[in-house]
């Protein structure tokens, strides 16, 4: 999937690869509580995460598989896998911030790997993961479908870019 993004520095539209990852309700619930783990008023979030800590391992390998199949950041996959080997030695707080990003930050933690838009370095369990994306039109656009979609998503027009230039 390609996603068009308006660049902030030159106001031109740029094309970036857009990745949509589907998360099961189990993972969504885990991440919901992980995001709120620092809530001191309601400790149910921390209790939930502590009781479901093992699900982080399942989620990690699910994201790693998604990376291998769709994102293609193989070197980063190896770095992440190496960092994750000691995941049980890390605190719940560090585990949560590594998956969803630090509290109050724009960073998405491990989901920086699958997010669309400009690449950003991120830290996962104390290891810095560099992100660089080089998507050239020749490699991405030859088999792409351009989708013009209305703001509401109710209407769309699809253009098969592989057929452009055909008589």
Image (spheres, rainbow, N blue to C red):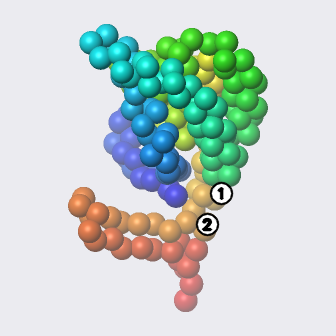
Please provide percent x and percent y for residue 33.
40, 27
Q: Residue at x 35, y 16 (%)?
A: 43
Please provide percent x and percent y for residue 45.
38, 22
Q: Dividing the image into 4 quarters, which one contains the C terminus?
A: bottom right
Residue holding disc 2 = 142
Looking at the image, the residue that sits furthest to the bottom is 167
Q: Where on the picture, by quarter, is residue 64?
A: top right
Q: Residue at x 58, y 33 (%)?
A: 55
Q: Name the side, left or right, on which 43 lies relative to 72.
A: left
Q: Where on the picture, by quarter, is residue 89?
A: top right
Residue holding disc 1 = 139
Element class at badge 1: helix
Element class at badge 2: loop
Foreground pick, 93 / 19: 93
Foreground pick, 95 / 165: 95
Asked whether disc 1 touches disc 2, contact meaning CB atoms under 8 Å apart, the reply is yes
Q: Residue at x 29, y 17 (%)?
A: 42
Q: Where on the picture, by quarter, is residue 165?
A: bottom right
Q: Name the side, left or right, on which 69 lies relative to 141.
A: right
């Amino acid at each position: 999937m390609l996603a068009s993004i308006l660049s902030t520095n030159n106001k031109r539209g740029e094309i970036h690869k857009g990745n949509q990852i589907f998360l099961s309700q189990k993972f969504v619930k885990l991440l919901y509580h992980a995001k709120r783990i620092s809530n001191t008023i309601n400790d149910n979030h921390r209790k939930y995460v502590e009781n479901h800590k093992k699900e982080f391992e399942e989620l990690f390998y699910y994201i790693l598989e998604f990376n291998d199949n769709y994102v293609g950041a193989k070197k980063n996959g190896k770095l992440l896998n190496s960092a994750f080997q000691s995941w049980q030695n890390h605190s719940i707080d560090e585990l949560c911030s590594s998956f969803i990003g630090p509290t109050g930050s724009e960073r998405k933690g491990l989901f920086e790997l699958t997010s669309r838009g400009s690449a950003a370095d991120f830290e996962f369990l104390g290891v810095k993961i560099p992100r660089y994306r080089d998507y050239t039109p020749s490699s991405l656009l030859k088999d792409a479908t351009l989708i013009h979609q209305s703001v509401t998503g109710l209407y769309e027009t699809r253009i098969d870019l592989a057929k452009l230039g055909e008589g």
